[in-house]
Image (spheres, rainbow, N blue to C red):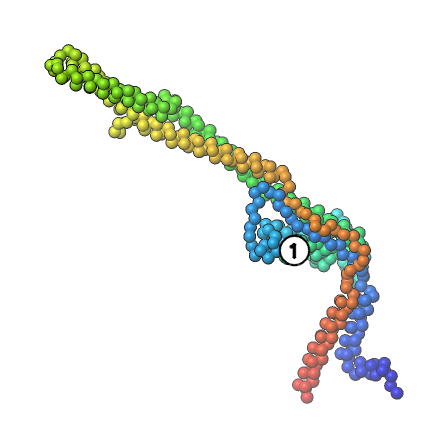
Amino acid sequence: MVSPIQRSVQWLRHSPLRSLTAVACVCSAVYWLGIASDRYVSESRLIIQSTSLHSGASLDLGSLISGASGGSRADQLLLREHLRSPDMAEILDAKLGLRAHFSSEGDWFSRLWGAQASREDFSTYYLRRVQVEYDEFAGVLVLKAQAYQPEMAQQINQALVREGERFMNRMAHAIAQDQVTFLEGQVETLNAKVQGSRQALLDFQEKKGLISPEAAAQVIATIVASLQGQLADLQAQRSALQAYLVKDHPNIVLLEQRIAAIEKQMAQEQAKLAAPGGKTLNRTAEAFAQLEMQSRFALDMYKTALTALEQGRLEATRTLKKVSVLQQPNLPQDATEPRRMYTSGVWIVVILLLAGIAHLLLAIVRDHKD
C-alpha cells in the first residue's frame, strides 16, 4: 500500500517542473513567514498652507475634486518630489546614518548591501523604505517611513517633516528675495527718473523766468478782462457824448485817445498769451504742463515702487509656507511590514502562474516534436 506522501514524491519526480515549482513555493513561504525581518512603519500626514498676503488661488481639476486650493496642491506635489529625491536621501543619511542602519540590520534579502553603497543604489533602496504620496481626495501629503527599529522609523519621519518645511520656506524666501532685489533696482531707476524730471522742470523755470506759466497766463487773462471792461465803459461814454457834441470836441478826442491806448494795451497782453508762430505764454504753459505731468507720473511710479518694495521686504522676512502636521510622526508599536500572509500568498500565486505558463510552453514544444 503506497502512502500519500510516497505518491506525492513519485508525482514530483515524474516532472522536474513540478518539483521546481513546489520548492519555489516552499522557499517563498518559509522566507516570508519566518525569515523576512520585521519593519516598523511611522506615518504622518501634513498639508502646506500659504501665509502670503498676495497669494492668488488657482483653480484646476484636482482642486475641484479634492476641495483643496490649486496652489496648495502644487506645493505639496513639489514637496513630494523633493522628499523622494536622492538629495533628501543623502541629507537623512548624514543626519541619521541611514546607510549604517539599513546595511547592519534586517535579513540578507531586505537589507542594504554595503554601508558604502553608491548614490544610485542607496536612492533606489531609500524609495523602497520611504513612501511620500499625495492623497487627491483628502488633499494631504502622506509620509510613511520604514525602519528595522521603531525609534528609527519615527526619527526618519520627523526629519522628513522638518526638512520639508525648511525646503518650502527656503524656496519661498528665495523667490521673495529675488522680487525684493528686482524692486530695489526699479526703485533706484525710478528715483533717477524723478530727479531728472524735477531738474528738467527747474531748468525750464529758470530759462523762462517763470515759476508757473499757468499762473502768469491767468494773471494776463485777468488784466485783459479788466481792460475789456474799461474799454466798454469808455466806448459807452464816447457814444453818449457824440449824441450832443461835435466829433472834434476835446472831451471826445480825449476819450478816443484813452480808447486807443487801452486797445493797444489789450493787443500787447493778448499777444503775450497767443500769437501765430510765436514763443507765446500758451506754448510755454503747454511745455511746462508736459514737464510737470512727466514729473508727477515719475513721482507716482516711484511711490508705487517704494510701497511694493516695503511689502516685498515684509514678505521676505515672514514665513510664507507653513507645513501644518495633521498627524504627528507616530512611534510604531507593532511591525506592520512585511505583510507575511498576503505577500507569501501573492508570491505562491505568481510562482504557480509562471509554472503553468512554462508547462504550457513545454507541452507545445512536445506536440511540435511529435
- In front here: 339 or 10? 339
User: Is residue 12 visible from the viewing direction of this image?
Assistant: yes
Q: Please provide percent x and percent y for residue 327.
A: 72, 51
Q: Quadrant of residue 315?
A: top right
Above or below — where is 16 with respect to 156? below
Toward the right, the furthest residue is: 1
Q: Quadrant of the N terminus?
A: bottom right
Above or below — where is 78 with respect to 309? below
- In front here: 292 or 102? 292
Q: Amino acid at mark 1?
A: Ala
Tell me the element at label 1: loop
Q: Please provide percent x and percent y for residue 250.
A: 15, 11
- In front here: 144 or 357? 144
Q: Please provide percent x and percent y for residue 50.
A: 62, 45
Toward the left, the furthest residue is: 246
Q: Quadrant of residue 254?
A: top left
Q: Quadrant of residue 317?
A: top right
Q: Indicate left or right for 320 with 6 as reference.
A: left
Residue, disc 1:
138
Q: Report the residue at 47% width, 33% height from top.
A: 300
Q: Report the residue at 69% width, 80% height from top.
A: 360
Above or below — where is 246 with respect to 271? above
Count of marks placed on residues? 1
Q: Please provide percent x and percent y for residue 20.
A: 77, 76
Q: Report the residue at 62% width, 43% height from top.
A: 51
- In front here: 368 or 145? 145
Q: Quadrant of the C terminus?
A: bottom right
